[in-house]
Amino acid sequence: MAFWSWPALLAPNEGQRTALVVTSLAYLVSQIGLIRLRSVYPGGRAAPFIAPLVLLAYGALALLALGLHLQVSRYLLLASGVAALFWFYVEYTLTFKYLRLKLAVIPGGRYTEDVLAIPFIDARPLPCLDLQGSRYDGVVADFDSIDAQTQRFLARCALNHTPVYDARQIFESLTGRVKIHRMSENNIGSLLPSPTYEFLKTLFDLSILLLTAPVVLPVALITALLIRMESPGPVIYSQTRIGRGNRPFTIYKFRSMRFDRNAPEQFAGEHDPRITRVGRVIRKLRIDEIPQFINILKGEMSLIGPRPEQPSFVAEYDKRIPFYSYRHIVKPGITGWAQVRHGYTASADETQVKIEHDFYYIKNCSLALDLIIAIMTVRIMLTGFGAR
């Protein structure tokens, strides 16, 4: 109405009709995507998901329309995207308090204390096997440590339409982590991605590389020129990392620090004086990772997966952290679940949590989860979360 007036709205031209279809589809995709995120994936109820998902939905459909050479009203696309973004944030603000899970936790077992310690839910220990008339979104118990009386209580809860959850499963679902120091042999055997998924993921990687090449190549050339102008040394920095099957390979990155061939392996601090001015920008925007497209073409990496570590760090963490090397069951990635959920790590304790995220990804890897990681990566590129 604001842009077209009544006559144009009643009899839109070709561009306006296309824009109506595109914006309606983009809004529906955004709405369905947010509902899906909130109900299925850890952290899906967080506000930072909104902007990346809306931008991805509207951007993808707009590019599709332009690629098909369809006439589209850019004003309507922009107005609809801004209005949708505004509305989703209003909706989130008004419903936030109702999105907080309220769980009744039956004490006892290995994982119930972990569930009670999750900060973003309302988890309450039950003093006795009785909900006492209170409404809960679910009842949580450690299924490996319950007696017959508790099983009867859980059956009554299910009959009364109160969901019943295993403590281990609810912990993994809400935190996006798998406790690696508590795994049995059967748990480890189940963490094997299917061959079909790996094949489809390879096709997805190659397709994305081909589609983004017209944008990525100019950015890479400009970045290389700025690096060469600012400081002496090679534009591309190479380093040995550990990849799939514990096999070493050479990873490539745009150099973001002053060149020192004899520098020891160490973590990069948030305000590391070695980082150049250009380097600080490209690290925040993750542009320094672009040369790793070469590693993807060589079959050594994927777009999404656990980040590859340096050999000395792998050797150290393998001594400190049980099952560490099992994270190398899949190809390492440029971005991954641990990066978008936890960010940068600089200690063994933080690495423990990061690896638990990696194990969650390996255990639940799918194209849908990869899409979630891609959406969250957009947010990271916009905010610089976790960069060093």
Image (spheres, grey):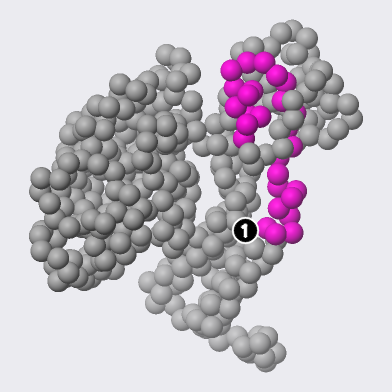
Quadrant in the rendering for residue 164: top right
* Closest to the observer, 354 or 89: 354
Q: Position of residue 185 (x, y in %)?
A: 42, 14
Point out residue 38 in the picture as x, y percentages from the top left corner: 62, 47
Left or right: 351 in relation to 219:
right
Residue on which the image places disc 1: 31
Measured as percent of width and height from the top left, residue 359 is found at 42, 31
SS label for mark 1: helix
User: Relative to residue 3, is residue 318 depicted above or below?
Assistant: above
Residue nearest the observer in this picture, 12 or 92: 92
* Location of residue 210 (image quadrant): bottom left
Q: Residue furthest front?
A: 273
Q: In this rendering, is residue 304 above or below 285?
A: above
Q: Is residue 138 above or below residue 145?
A: below
Residue drawn at (62%, 89%) of the image = 4
Q: Which image quadrant is residue 355 in?
A: top left
Residue 208 visible from this viewpoint: no
Q: Is residue 110 magenta?
A: yes
Name the kind of residue labelled 1 in the image. Gln
Whether residue 105 is in magenta: the answer is: yes
Say if residue 54 shows up in the picture: yes
Q: Is 206 positioned to the left or the right of 45 in the image?
A: left
Q: Is residue 245 left or right of residue 9?
A: left
Q: Residues within 10 Å of mark 1 (few under 14, many from 20)?
A: some
Viewer-proximal residue among 267 and 66: 267
Residue at horizontal 23%, vertical 51%?
A: 292
The stretch of residues the image draws in magenta is 92-118
Q: Quadrant of the N terminus?
A: bottom right
Is 27 left, or right, of 284 in this rendering?
Answer: right
- As rendered, which of 321 and 382 lies closer to the eye? 321
Q: Position of residue 306 (x, y in %)?
A: 35, 39
Q: Residue at x 36, y 40 (%)?
A: 346
